[in-house]
Amino acid sequence: MTAVPADHSNAKQQLAVVALGALGVVYGDIGTSPLYALRECFSAATGVVPTTENVLGILSLAFWTVTVLVTLKYVTLVLRADYRGEGGAMALMALTRRAVGSSNRLRAFVLAAGLIGTALFFGDAMLTPAISVLSAIEGLEIATPVFRPYVVPVALAVIVGLFLVQSRGTGSVGRLFGPIMLLWFTVLGLLGLWMIVRSPHVLAAINPMHAVQFVVEEGWHVFIPLGAVFLAITGAEALYADLGHFGAKPIRTAWLSVAMPGLLLNYFGQGALVLEDPTATRNPFYLLVPEPFLYPMVALATAATVIASQAVISGAFSLFNQAIQLGLAPRAEVRHTSSSEIRQVYLPQINYALLIGVVALVLTFGSSSELAAAYGIAVSGTMVVTSILAMLAAIHLWHWPRVAVVGVFGTLLAVDLIFFAANALKVFEGGWVPLVIAAVIYISSTTWIQGRHALYVKLAAESATLEDFLRSVGPKVPRVRGTAVYLARLGETVPHALLHNIKHNKVLHERVLLMTVINEEIPVVPRESRVEAHELEKGFWRVTVRYGFLQSPNLPRALGQLSPQLEINIHDTSFFLGRVTLMPALKPLIPRWRRSLYFALARNASSAPDFFRIPTDRVVEVGAQIAL
């Protein structure tokens, strides 16, 4: 018997632990799809009758959709597109923008695609908690119709409770996610396997010809049930979005060893049940559960949907924080809920906006079946964006031959577009909801970008050059003890706060730091590369601080890194910040409607001291009026 090396054994154990964590966080959303996906395939809206041919056709479509779009596209290919270990819409956008080089037109296209994908994700982030929790609680109706009036109130109570605990962070709760989801997928697989053993002929659906035959017989009508089949893979984007949390290998291991087998076995088990009893289409998931285990299954399903919702909510926090760091969204309060994990953040404004949206969706639609019509279009749109950006990455980063890119990603993009078209048919049945949410976010983001650019153009036009300013600082200008820090844009212009301070107070500190904060299009800037200082003249210093889009600025901490080059006493340092009051100009630099929206976004943005974590007793604000 050959002994297994200790380091190899430890590596396998570590992989198993990380894969278990990935199972809990990454696969919560897609893992709860069996609650409603097959049911919706045979709903009255699709018009598909549960005959043997139709059941095998639907199962075959579901099997090959999971295999091609999840296993091939995401697990095999897209996970390769990591940006220094990070994944997700923002990381892929930043990676692709750097890969395409200096082509302004292509970079602008990549930015627009990334913003669209991000906006669609937020539509999904509102729908996932609503449909997942509702579908789990609806299992009570299977036990007895007496519970029917209580489904919505109980679901709302679970959802409100979920959002209220967000401020505590997900670190401690996250340790429970893996074991619970392992139990969930195990139960899914065992329930499906039990039914497959009773009706093994259902496995014939693995043959893709059943899918082809179903598509041919349905003709153009097939787009309606395809929108329901797509529900089987909602949540697949999480595989890529959580790449930085776990790494590609644990995510692949969790999918291939636990998540995929559990899901497919359950879908085939539900199909076998429908073949035996066509009336089971009203809720094949819960009717698959033996009656004595129904209530425990409702409890387990509720826990699984809460985990699925938690993963999406945490993803929304992380994504919005990344957008802020990249200058694509207004500043918002960001609280770090872990002293060791930079990705664990809580944004109160986003949390309560999501809560209001989810509650409104539950009250408006009232059931998971009604919500299913709205679900899917946001996810399918995000998948289209991912395929397009991954195609550009394959060309400009991986240097694949064009023929291979068109053959592989062109085919995957075509499949994504088919599913997007199928979900687009549901626009008037509720699909408009995530599209409206995405449109609001996209318009707000592009307005913020245009407004900031117009503001900086106006400030630069009214500013003085640093060289002229330093020349004007003579010995007659009084200098006081201490350090003054002025936030400055990258370039050779003088901050407005500095100009106004010397104009009105006619005094300078003995040491003046012109600090520029640069948000790099990389996930994390290492500590040793984060702060640079260059001495100018007459007590002036140029300080540059760099952060990645997964990091949050902390300027007092950054100043502490200047030692021993510059010894900064934070209690003897004043931060001079410009407070700009925006006024409407007769000839606006941006369209009037965008200007009004930008003014509103700017008024509600988090204050600079809060965002940069500057102690309020060290801040001096200098006002200025700017007409846009």
Image (spheres, helix red, strand yellow):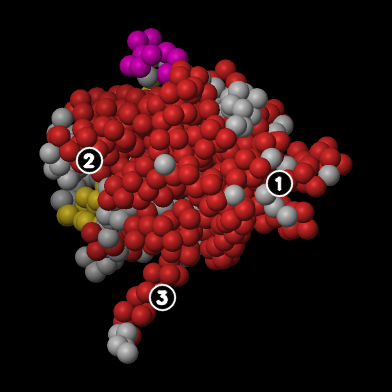
Tag 3 or tag 1, which sits nearer the N-term? 3
Q: Give the distance between the C-alpha atoms of the residues marked 1 and 3, in whole angstroms.
A: 37 Å
What type is the residue that disc 3 sits on?
Gln
Task: Identify the residue shown where x is 46% and y is 18%.
Answer: 220
Give the magenta range. 586-597
Residue 393, label in figure: 2
Q: Nearer the viewer, residue 7 or 356?
A: 7
Tag 2 or tag 1, which sits nearer the N-term? 1
Q: Tag 2: Cα neighbours inside 10 Å, few (<14), some, or many (≥20)?
A: many
Q: Nearer the viewer, residue 483 or 82?
A: 82
Residue 65: which quarter of the image? top left
Q: Is residue 326 above or below residue 190?
A: above
- Counting from the top left corner in percent of width and height, residue 211 is at 44, 34
Task: Identify the residue shown where x is 15% and y is 34%.
Answer: 403
Residue identifier under label 3: 13
The answer to whether residue 45 is visible is yes
Q: Is residue 539 above or below residue 118?
A: below
Q: Is residue 585 above or below residue 320?
A: above
Q: Are marks 1 and 2 in contact (CB under 8 Å)?
A: no
- Counting from the top left corner in percent of width and height, residue 108 is at 25, 28
Q: Is residue 210 above or below residue 594?
A: below
Residue identifier under label 1: 287
In the image, 501: left or right of 133? left
Q: Give the distance between the C-alpha atoms of the residues marked 2 and 3, in whole angstroms.
A: 33 Å
- Counting from the top left corner in percent of width and height, residue 608 is at 44, 43
Is 107 in the magenta?
no
